[in-house]
Amino acid sequence: MDVLRPDPAVLLDLARARMPFGKYAGWRLMKVPEPYLVWFAREGFPGGKLGEQMALALEIKTNGLEPLVEALDVGE
């Protein structure tokens, strides 16, 4: 059985990523409230890497997996 494993580089990049615009500009993506990410999921995530990171952040939050990213301790 082939088990999917999260790419540590992707998780580290997500842990460091910040929201570049809007109400939560400057916040780390993993700290952006879930309802805000759900709104983007409904309306459409931005294109490119930011949209992919926002979608991943939502997936992680939805499944209660925040400790995977929080354990990376990237500082503030």
Image (tube, rainbow, N blue to C red):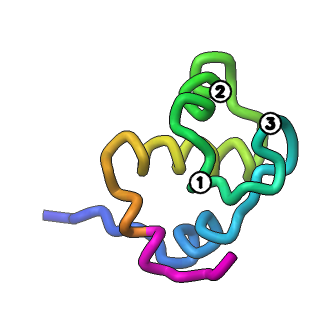
Question: What residue type is disc 3 on?
Answer: Lys
Question: What residue type is disc 2 on?
Answer: Phe
Examine the rendered structure and indicate whether residue 45 appears above or below residue 3.
above
Residue in the image at 42% along x and 50% along y: 60
Residue 12: image quadrant is: bottom right
Marks 3 and 2 sit apart, C-alpha to C-alpha, by 13 Å
Examine the rendered structure and indicate whether residue 46 appears above or below residue 3.
above
Categorize mark 1 by other alpha carbons within 10 Å: few (<14), some (14-19), many (20+).
some
Examine the rendered structure and indicate whether residue 44 appears above or below residue 6.
above
Marks 3 and 1 sit apart, C-alpha to C-alpha, by 13 Å
Residue 42: image quadrant is: top right
Bounds of the magenta span? 69-76
Residue extending farthest to the top is 43
Residue denoted by label 2: 40
Question: What residue type is disc 1 on?
Answer: Lys
Residue in the image at 67% along x and 17% along y: 43
Contact flag, marks 3 and 2 (Cβ < 8 Å): no
Dot 3 lies on which element?
Answer: loop
Residue 41 is situated, as x and y percent measured from the top left of the image, at 58, 26
Q: Nearer the viewer, mark 2 or mark 1?
A: 1
Residue denoted by label 1: 31
Residue 5: image quadrant is: bottom left
Say which mark, if any, is on residue 23. Answer: 3
| Left or right, 40 with reference to 4 | right
